[in-house]
Structure formats: structure tokens, C-alpha cells
């Protein structure tokens, strides 16, 4: 998850100066905060190029996927779904020698990305990041993967303060259609490339830890998952938080916030600027049994979202209970 991260002098990222050589920007070396900036401006590093580096590391972008197709599914795959892939489309098309670019929840050995032997690229979504802007971190990893030699993983890396974001690289008109998998065999589907003993062990551990998960077909960004004793439905929603809390409170006070007998709205997560309501489900209620009640709930929620009158006392109490059961993931 994107977090504020302290960093030592030795791990600060390089930033680029305004000086150009042979048509490209030259990197400014990292020095002590009180030392003269190597760019020659005469100012201390912390007041010159060090400021951009520090800002990039500490500023947290609340909604890193805002503006991308499928923002809610980006959040779900980052925080909730163990094993899934999505085909990505780049602005201007794929570079020569790159037959496909695929987003994956995780990759073996926690690689940030992998350039396969055939030139295709896998980009991991659930890795730790070096700055407060997850979109910028992922875009930097993607660019390095596109330029990597076939058959090699991409290592973790401190991103430039002024680098592009996913919104700059991905086709905004392309669809975003996650495919949820039962395991991680998609890591090496057709060959034994990179299938070292370490990768095989990583695959075995990942499969053992994966929670069975299904994406509902009838509503957007809702994911059923199976856990011991009961199941859950976790539904990433695009609505503004205050408006969504009001709507859920109206339904909860009216006794219509559940998904049927034996189910209960138990609270919500907050992740990457979006809310994720969570329902407890009976262990016998599978993903298919969720489809109809979820679609019916979506209609009730739409009606509640359209109401703009003040909450009643009972609705305010329901809202307070929902707020108290909210957990922030990122």
C-alpha cells in the first residue's frame, strides 16, 4: 500500500536537473540536505532539487487510480483479491517486440514486473512502493519492464519525482476486465521460464495462502470470498464517502441493507480514497447465490443515493454505527 516512508540520505531518489546534455536531462546526485545543490544553483540541496525528491516520497495521493478505467477494480485487485490478471492497453499501442502487457495481483518472488521470454510484460500490483503515489510507482515499473531484456524480472527501484503516472501511459478508452484465478499458475502458464526452485516454492506458498474469490457478474466491482465459518461480499464503490454513508445509513435504518436472510452489512474498508462495504454471508451462500440479491441491493442503493433530505435520528444512529466499523486499509 502507498504509505509515507521515511528515508535515509543513502536511499533518496535521484532527481533531474534543468540542465540538458545531448537533448536529455542529466541526473542530479543526492547529497546532504545542507550541502550546495550539485546543479550549480547556489542553493542548498534541500531548498533546490532535494525538495522535489522529498515531496515525491512523502506526499500521499489519496486516489492513485482516479481517472483510470475500472478504478474500483484497481482498488479491489490491489487490496482484496489474491490472484487475478487484466490485459492492459497502452496509449499509442504496444511497442515493437511486446506482444502483450498484463496486470497481475502478485508475481513470484515479489517481483515488481517480469518481461517474459516472448517479450510480453507482467506488472505486479500488490508490491510495496517507494513513494506516496502508487500510480507513479507502477508507471515507472511498467516503463522499465517494457525496456527490459526478455526473460528477466524487474527489480524494485526509487521512482523519479517527475515521472509519468499510469494515467499518462494507459489507454483511457480501453476496458478493464479482471480475470480472477483460483491460483497463481498464470505465472508460468506455457513453459518453465524462470521456474527455479525458488519460484516453485513461491508458487506453492502463494497457492496455499490464496482465499477463494469470485467477481460477481451482475454488478460492478463486487467480490465474493470464502473464509472459515462464513463467507463475505466485499464491494468497492465509486461514490463520495459522505454520500455513500448517508445512503447506507438510510437502508440500514430501514432494515434493507442486507443481502437476504442470514446476511448482514458489518462495516466497510476505506482503500485508496474509495469505500468498500462488507457483508457477512452464510457459509452455504456461494457467489452465484449472491448475484440476484446484490443486483437488488444496487437498485435500493441507487434510490437511497438520490435522496437529499436530512437524516432522521434513527438514520443518524445507523450512520454512526457504520462509521465506527470502518477500517482504513490505505
Image: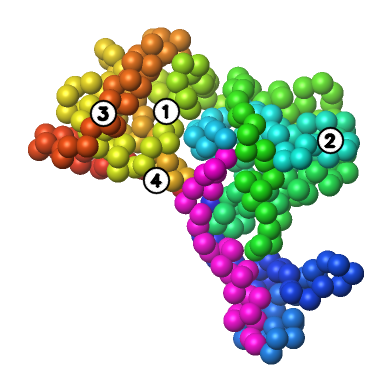
Instruction: Assess disc 4: are there few (<14), some (14-19) or many (≥20) residues with their C-alpha within 10 Å of its C-alpha.
Output: few
330 relative to 287, above or below: below
Does the stretch in magenta take in 64? Answer: yes
- The residue at 9%/38% (across/down) is 313
Q: Residue beneath label 3, please?
A: 304
- The residue at 34%/42% (across/down) is 241
Residue 30 image point, x, y percent? 71, 75
- The disc, 2 or 3, on the residue closer to the chain's N-terminal end is 2
Does the stretch in magenta take in 287? Answer: no
Q: Can residue 230 be seen in this view?
A: no
Secondary structure category for the residue under label 4:
strand
- The residue at 88%/38% (across/down) is 96
- The disc, 1 or 3, on the residue closer to the chain's N-terminal end is 1
C-alpha distance separating marks 4 and 2: 38 Å
Pick whichever, 122 or 164, lies toward us: 164
Q: Residue beneath label 1, please?
A: 234
Q: Residue beneath label 4, please?
A: 328
**Region rendered in magenta:** 43-68
Residue 132 image point, x, y percent? 55, 57
- The disc, 4 or 3, on the residue closer to the chain's N-terminal end is 3
Instruction: Assess disc 1: are there few (<14), some (14-19) or many (≥20) residues with their C-alpha within 10 Å of its C-alpha.
Output: many
Q: Residue beneath label 2, please?
A: 98
Contact between marks 1 and 4 (CB within 8 A): the answer is no
Q: Is residue 96 visible?
A: yes
Q: Of discs 1 and 2, which sits in the foreground?
A: 2
Amino acid at each position: 500500500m502507498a504509505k509515507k516512508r521515511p528515508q535515509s540520505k543513502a536511499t533518496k531518489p535521484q532527481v533531474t536537473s534543468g540542465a540538458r546534455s545531448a537533448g536529455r536531462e542529466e541526473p542530479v546526485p543526492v547529497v546532504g540536505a545542507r550541502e550546495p545543490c550539485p546543479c550549480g544553483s547556489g542553493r542548498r540541496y534541500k531548498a533546490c532539487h532535494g525538495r522535489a525528491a522529498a515531496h515525491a516520497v512523502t506526499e500521499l495521493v489519496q486516489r492513485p487510480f482516479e481517472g483510470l478505467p475500472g478504478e474500483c477494480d484497481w482498488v479491489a485487485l490491489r487490496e482484496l483479491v489474491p490472484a487475478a490478471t487484466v490485459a492492459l492497453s497502452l496509449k499509442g499501442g504496444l511497442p515493437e517486440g511486446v506482444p502483450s502487457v498484463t496486470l497481475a495481483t502478485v508475481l513470484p518472488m515479489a517481483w515488481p514486473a517480469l518481461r517474459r521470454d516472448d517479450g510480453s510484460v507482467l506488472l505486479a500490483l500488490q508490491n510495496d512502493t517507494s513513494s506516496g503515489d502508487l500510480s507513479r510507482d507502477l508507471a515507472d515499473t511498467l516503463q522499465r519492464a517494457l525496456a527490459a531484456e526478455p526473460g528477466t524480472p524487474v527489480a524494485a527501484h526509487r521512482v523519479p519525482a517527475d515521472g509519468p503516472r499510469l494515467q499518462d501511459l494507459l489507454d483511457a478508452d480501453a476496458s478493464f476486465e479482471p480475470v480472477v484465478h483460483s491460483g497463481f499458475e498464470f505465472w508460468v502458464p506455457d513453459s518453465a521460464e524462470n521456474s527455479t526452485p525458488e519460484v516453485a516454492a513461491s508458487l506453492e506458498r502463494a497457492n496455499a495462502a490464496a482465499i477463494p474469490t469470485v467477481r460477481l457478474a451482475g454488478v460492478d466491482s463486487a467480490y465474493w470470498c470464502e473464509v472459515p465459518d462464513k463467507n463475505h461480499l466485499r464491494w468497492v464503490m465509486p461514490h463520495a464517502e459522505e454520500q455513500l454513508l448517508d445512503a447506507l445509513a438510510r437502508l440500514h435504518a430501514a432494515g434493507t441493507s442486507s443481502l437476504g436472510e442470514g446476511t448482514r452489512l458489518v462495516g466497510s474498508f476505506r482503500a485508496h480514497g474509495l469505500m468498500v462495504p462488507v457483508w457477512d454471508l452464510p457459509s452455504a451462500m456461494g457467489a452465484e447465490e449472491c448475484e440476484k440479491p446484490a443486483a437488488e441491493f444496487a437498485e435500493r442503493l441507487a434510490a437511497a443515493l438520490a435522496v437529499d433530505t436530512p437524516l432522521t435520528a434513527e438514520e443518524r444512529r445507523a450512520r454512526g454505527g457504520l462509521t465506527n466499523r470502518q477500517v482504513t486499509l490505505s
